Amino acid sequence: MKYWLVKSEPGTFSWDQQVKKGVSSWDGVRNHAAAGHLRAMKCGDRAFFYHSNEGKEIVGIVEVAKEAYPDPTDATRKFVAVDLKTLKPLPKPVTLAQIKTDKTLKDMALVRLSRLSVQPVTPEEWNRVCALGGI
DNA sequence: GCCAACGTTGGC
DNA sequence: GCCAACGTTGGC
């Protein structure tokens, strides 16, 4: 199983909305690097749900429910979307400030490639964030 | 195919 | 609101 991190601005699509929907269509990605990661996702992979701009913290965990398919919001048909299912919230959200000061996490893509909206997470990083998040 | 200009993202 | 990073566009 692989691990990922997806970003969303709470003003556009928040964790609360993800929880209410149960399964969301993760579309609208228009960056080739991010799209490459979407294509690499397999059913059952897990991803952290990160709030950018407001909050700046990892708030929950989702699971890939449907692998990459053509993004219905993309007229050019070049980009893809996936479906993400709500798994569970982090009892204690892990903030960007925490990540930056943590020895294991300070080199995460989240810190180094701040603009990448879909990114891979290593098992070490995954376990560390879960521990900090109270799981 | 190079590169400057421009737009967008996202942290501060 | 500012600015750094970086992707995209368009002239050459």
Image (cartoon, coloured by chain):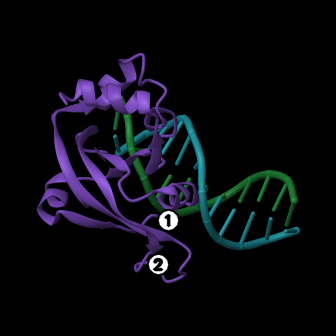
Chain colours: A purple, B green, C cyan
Residue at figure coordinates x 27%, y 51% from the top left: A62
Name the chain letter of the residue that bears numbered label 1.
Answer: A
* Residue C10 spot, x, y in % from top left: 71, 73
Name the chain letter of the residue that bears numbered label 2.
Answer: A
Same chain for mark 1 and mark 2? The answer is: yes
* Residue A106 spot, x, y in % from top left: 44, 23
Residue A11 seen anywhere in this rendered image of the structure: no
Relative placement, left or right, of A24 versus A1 is: left
* Residue A2 spot, x, y in % from top left: 44, 45
Circle number at residue A30? 1
Density class for disc 2 (Cα within 10 Å; few <14, some 14-19, many ≥20) is: some
In front of the other: A133 or A7: A133
In front of the other: C10 or C5: C5
Residue under numbered circle 2: A74
Element under label 1?
Answer: loop
Spot the residue most to the bottom: A75
Relative placement, left or right, of B6 versus A25 is: right
Q: CA distance from mark 1 to mark 2?
A: 9 Å
